[in-house]
Image (spheres, coloured by chain):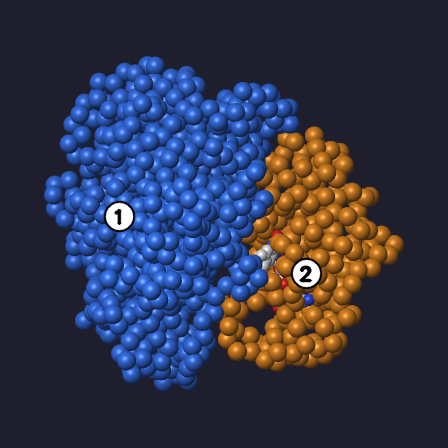
Chain colours: A orange, B blue
Amino acid sequence: MYEFDFERPSTIAEAVAALATEDAQALGGGQTLIPTLKQRLASPSKLVSLSGIAEMKGISADGGTVTIGGGTSHAAVAAGAGAYPALAALAGNIGDPAVRSRGTIGGSLANNDPSACYPSAALASGATIVTNTREIAADDYFEGMFTTALEEGEIITAVRFPVPDAAAYAKFEQPASRFALVGVFVAKYADGVRVAVTGASEDGVFRWTEAEEALSANFSVDAVAGLSASADGLISDLHGDAAYRAHLIGVMTKRAVAAAS
Amino acid sequence: MPKDNGIGASPKRREDVRFLTGRGKYTDDIQLANTSYACFARSDVANGVIKSIDTSAAEAMPGVLAVFTGEDFVEVGGNPAGWAISSRDGTPMHEPKRPVLAHGKVRHVGDAYAAVVAETPEQARDAAEAIEIDIEEQPAVIDMAAALSGSTFVHDEIGTNQCFDWGWIEDNREATDEAIKNAPHVTTLELINNRVVPNAMEPRASIGDYDPGTDEYKLYTTSQNPHLTRLLISAFVLGIPENKLTVVAPDVGGGFGSKIYHYGEEALVLAAAKKLARPVKWTASRSEAFLTDAHGRDHVTKIELACDKEGNFIAFRTETLANVGAYLSNFSTATPTFLHGTLMAGTYTVPNVYVNVKTVFTNTAPVDAYRGAGRPEATYSIERVIDKCADELGIDKIEIRRKNFIQPDQYPYTTPVGLSYDIGNYDALMDTLERRLDVAGFEARRAESAANGKLRGIGINSYIEACGIAPSNLVGQLGSRVGLYDAATVRVNATGNISVMVGAHSHGQGHETVFPQVVAEMLGIDEASIDIVHGDSSKIPFGMGTYGSRSLAVCGSAVVRATEKIINKGKKIAAHMLEASDADIELVDGQFTVAGTDKSVGFGDVALKAYIPHEFPLEDIEPGLEETAFYDPANFTYPSGAYGCEVEVDPETGKVDILKFVACDDFGNVVNPMIVEGQVQGGLGQGIGQAMLEVGTYDADGQLTNGSYMDYAMPRADDMPQMVVDHSNGTACTHNPLGVKGCGEAGAIGSPPTVVNAVVNALRSAGHDVTHIDMPLTPSRVWAAMNG
Ligand SMILES: Cc1cc2nc3c(=O)[nH]c(=O)nc-3n(C[C@H](O)[C@H](O)[C@H](O)COP(=O)(O)OP(=O)(O)OC[C@H]3O[C@@H](n4cnc5c(N)ncnc54)[C@H](O)[C@@H]3O)c2cc1C
């Protein structure tokens, strides 16, 4: 690591002020950022820990919406988001217990790793990303691998998920990291079905509209059995080429639908 | 009643008390006063000429004490290869110098070209980043076949990337070619034995210390063999006299081969300690471990099996390209040759065997012995091609093996590739495997899996290895530059308890528990009063360390011999005390007794007498009770086994689940059954890791693309199947006193072909025309094989 200053404010306002310093960076659970610092791949002037901000933590369920504070750990979501079981299940299968105890939903969505799990839940749920300055619809938030609509110094303070009638996340794990090699989140709402795919695309999480249309007409495994995702623009790496990932998108979609039905 | 003391008992591992409570003392835990810290500047290009190195900025940085480059070590020696191998045409192998720090050229990503020593690790790292190097990059030599035909060289001065072209046995070549040409059936298989990164839990670390008052050096280091490391540093690299250099390998957190070898970092910390007259410490990061620990395996092989239509074997012929990486690591020339080619008859009576191995320099990390070392590669080739042959001929996989097994009445059995197996019983092992895997019930289980949409497969394998490395005379003829005996000193203290100083080194094997069991059994005393001393060259006799499943078979034999000397001397002392003749004294349950009488004296009383020699026959017996023995084995030992497993393949995703694994091994006599079971389980973990998950991958530019756990998959608990470990078929080794063979590597040798055989079987059962899939059998590879 290179040297940096450290602050641990207790309110969002203080955190925003602390982040105004040039090259200051927010620290969530540190599960992505700390390894990056250890490798000396980043050199922030200051880390502003969000872990002491009570108003950014916690889960509330209200009138068909689950709201999760941006500083809430994966473990807390796994244990406390019973109102949205598919989301709780997703959180409960991220990493290992140490990662889940430290890592946060805000950190995961801010980082927008193309293989991360949460982005698929946010996009498939049409969630709202709440920051210190505004509210961003999930459809406008994800802008490609490791890129989001967040401005410099902007903090995710909460995420609002409309609770679907049925939903499930099917994750096929990359053998080494156990992030998603392909993960598919399917969520069925009164006005239609949304399907979001993570792990597969060079542009990060995306919606598989063909499957959405088929499932909106007929929410069943059969409805998607004949569909195949295009391999164009999908990731090819050590763990699987684009054709394999395209195939897995179909398989994981079917499995998510089966689990949600 | 199971025994609770001595040979055959399973006391809990006494070393685990400190390991499991965080009290192990590893190299990095040792904190000498006034320690400074080294950090290495490492190449990020695979192949290039060093045009210039500018260290001035680094030298001016805070806390920096010294900066070293390759220039500082041109006068000292290179780190040598331990075996000299000749090519088929008689020419000696190419042996380019392996310097302490790269000089003139960098040859792999991670190759160290400079080192900084500073007051703190962070300062050393900051300064290492400030070193400016100008490298004229050359194309990377990565693919072995291309390396042999190309005109870019890893070592320009030798003008070829081939280290040697070895034939074994060259006299078999013509007959084998002829037999294959005329055979009724020939099965050919091309396969890759994938490169693995050792990944010991403890990364390498070294501390150099120098005392200007006495001109003595001390090296604390993560080594499997402190004396060998001392010998290499003294005789070849730095020229420090052996009597002025102590090498201590304290607790070591796993080695798997990678810590046998001497590495440049060890020489650097010693040279720096001398220059600064301060201790210098270096601890590898995990990234450095990935880039610089000697990797394992990495063979590309074509094997042919010739047989008649009934499956009786006629010949094996192998052509292998073996990667040695950028420099010759200490055992790198022995591993693909004498630890591989000599095993190419397996457990079978096959009249013709010929092996050709070309070793190839590439711009990758050095490759050397890794758990099993050569024998896994041999087993994999043989056992895969046999399965393919059985499929082609429509013969049952177990039947084709049994048909060709060497039979118990054929021992000693000399193979066409130069080994003489002393004893074994392969049919007995296979019988046990059939029973414990319930082979007869397989079809019913396959139907059950099919009902759940899964493809079930069964894999069978028969392995043999040459362990207890090694008879010095024999390996000397084969090119070894060292002897491979071991040594032990048994020191009985005045109060009757015992310290046993051993040349073997324990880095997970459990020697501290097992060796006392042997001594306790022989002396008839409680093993709790016996302790092992190992790892410190100033305390132990000159031993060759631990690898090649040799500790008990070789060093344990030395312990037996030294203990026998103790018993003989004890008898003399007892005879004097009891006023009897030594010939009449026997040692029973810790009592020296005059045979046929009730006159006896306890072991403790004899020890006390030895150290308080009042009324002692000093003209006949020296005082004291301490004996040393060196033991050089008469032959290798030959553990063997029948392994089997069942897998389920998800046809939609290609994901493989290993459901059950049965390992039936013949380790000869077993001293501690619990530890043996643990060793086999650990070996299976590594073998299954290689088969299912692991492969070190370099891209065309020579970058290790999976140099972290984000992309390099290690086996985890839930990757492991239900394991059944059976060692009920032991046939005692005929030539060492304990009748033991060694169990450390078996699991890693026997499991990869077992797993691949099972997966291929599963796919074929569903009509896929798949004859082979290269390891690791990741879901994407298995899926591609099904949909290819
Ligand atoms: C071993 C391991 C396994 C893992 N497995 C998985 C997995 O299976 N699936 C998965 O999805 N993830 C996985 N992760 C990643 C994990 O979920 C991380 O916790 C997550 O990606 C980052 O969250 P964090 O709170 O730790 O953020 P940090 O690492 O602290 O920060 C990450 C980035 O987000 C920024 N940031 C943090 N919080 C906020 C905020 N509230 N507002 C704005 N910006 C913020 C930081 O500045 C930084 O740029 C794994 C991680 C590890 C170490």
Q: Which of B365 and A60 is in front in this view?
A: B365
Q: Residue under circle 2?
A: A101
Residue at the (61%, 75%) spot, across then down: A47
* Mark 2 Cβ inside 8 Å of ligand 1: no
The quarter holding residue B405 reads top left
Residue B123: quadrant of the picture: bottom left
Could you tell whether B75 is left or right of B318 in the image?
left
Q: Nearer the viewer, mark 2 or mark 1?
A: 1
Between residue B348 and residue B473, name the one nearer to us: B473
Does residue B248 appear in this view?
Answer: no
Chain designation of label 2: A
**Residue extending farthest right:** A63
Q: Nearer the viewer, residue B64 or B614?
A: B614
Query: With B598 as the anchor, is A218 left or right in this view?
Result: right
Secondary element type, mark 1: loop
Q: Say the numbered circle drawn on residue B592.
A: none
Q: Which residue is drawn at 61% across and 66% down?
A: A30
- Disc 1 chain ID: B
Image-quadrant location for residue A101: bottom right
**Residue at the left extreme, as displayed:** B90
The disc placed on residue B632 is 1
